Image (cartoon, rainbow, N blue to C red):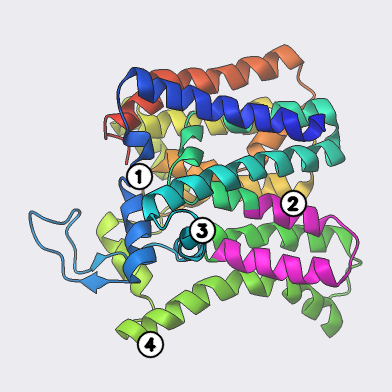
Amino acid sequence: MKKILIPLVIYLALLGIYSGFSAIEDNSFLFRPVWDIDHYVTISEQGYIKHPCNPGLHYPLGDICGNVGWYPMWPLVVRTFRPVLGNSYQTSFLTLAYIFGAAGFILMFLLVDRLHGFKTAILTVSALAFGPSAFYYLTGFPYALILFLFVIYLHLLYREQDIIREIGLFASALMLSLSYPSGLLFAVIPLIWYWSEKERDYKSINYWLKMARYLVPFALGPLILWTYFYIEFDDFFLQLHFQEKYNRNWAFPLWTMAKSLINNPIFSPENLTMLWYGLIFAAFYPYRIRKELWIFGLVMYFFSPATGSMMSLYRHYLIIFPVFMIIGASARPAWFKILYIASGIFLALYIFFPTFINSRLI
């Protein structure tokens, strides 16, 4: 029972801290459909919409405006459960975020406890809750859902093979890839796991077919979405064309990071995020978590800067879940881990969350 109660209490502490902060400030920004959440709401209510951008009304300007830049899994989940949640989209988004968030915390705790032990699980879930931008798990963004799907996928991947495992892996992988633009990159986990765990026979067609069984559902998500865009809007790459106005072009990630450090204040949310997550990879080496997890973490760490922009990095890094496992499983002394976790909540309460509720954290 304590393996359920402990992560639930930690999650409730997360909810209590930011709800209390909002109440003290008399600010409801945390609970409103702000920024991208509004696009998820419109997808749930009206489906995908594409139209020309109007100067003075839409930002940023470009050739394409609407909601075609966002992925459909989260709006579909909300649309499915809305009738039993009071028929209000705003209430449904928040309620489901809390449900998936609490379930994700519990499942993460159970997973890490099974792989690394009880104390490691406590530290991992604490790091998850008290990171600099963990309050986004409490919003109408899809991050709580992605956390839930991630831990479900790992629970299934690391269990004995049976039909439930195979169906569950396919379904959770497909839903991950339909949840977020970088959802495709979760395929790194089964790729490295299969390469490491299975006997390698590169000349065998069966070897490659079995590997493909794990990878295909991650590719299916974008293909399904883009095929829909082709049928509906006659543009297979509409989602990529939509993103052009955000100046996202492939770039060398270290150069993007260096430019951010040179051109922006060191205490800007983007730079602090980059440094806080980057220091985890440096300070807690060597890693005691599974190879496929920390490799996936590194891939995700460099992916957003590789698009040539640091915009919203504090949100994009939320789904680098293995970094929290790296902290928890590290050989570093407990006081060092606790201090690092405390630095995350300090940055959250003094910089990130005040900036967010003042509508200056996109």
Tell me if mark 4 has few (under 14), some (14-19) or many (20+) residues whose alpha carbon lies within 10 angstroms of its own.
few
Say which element carries label 3: helix
Q: Which amino acid does label 1 sit on?
A: Met
**Structural distance between the alpha carbons of marks 4 and 2:** 36 Å
**Structural distance between the alpha carbons of marks 1 and 3:** 36 Å
The range drawn in magenta is 149-177
Tell me if mark 2 has few (under 14), some (14-19) or many (20+) residues whose alpha carbon lies within 10 angstroms of its own.
some
Kindly identify which residue carries mark 3: 84
Q: What residue type is labelled 3?
A: Val
- Earlier-in-chain disc, 4 versus 2: 4
**Structural distance between the alpha carbons of marks 2 and 3:** 38 Å
Residue beneath the point at 51% across and 58% down: 84
Residue 90 appears left or right of 212? left
Give whichever of 22, 224 is nearer the camera.
Answer: 22
Q: Is disc 2 in contact with disc 3, using a CB cutoff of under 8 Å?
A: no
The quadrant the N terminus occupies is top right
Q: What residue type is labelled 4?
A: Ile
Kindly identify which residue carries mark 4: 231
Q: Quadrant of residue 266?
A: top left
Q: What residue type is labelled 2?
A: Glu
Tell me if mark 1 has few (under 14), some (14-19) or many (20+) residues whose alpha carbon lies within 10 angstroms of its own.
some
Percent of width and height locating residue 357: 32, 30
- Earlier-in-chain disc, 2 versus 3: 3
- Earlier-in-chain disc, 4 versus 1: 4
Observer able to see residue 300: no
**Structural distance between the alpha carbons of marks 2 and 1:** 27 Å
Kindly identify which residue carries mark 1: 311
Observer able to see residue 261: yes
Which marked residue is nearer to the observer: mark 4 or mark 2?
A: 4
Q: Which residue lies furthest to the top in this view?
A: 335
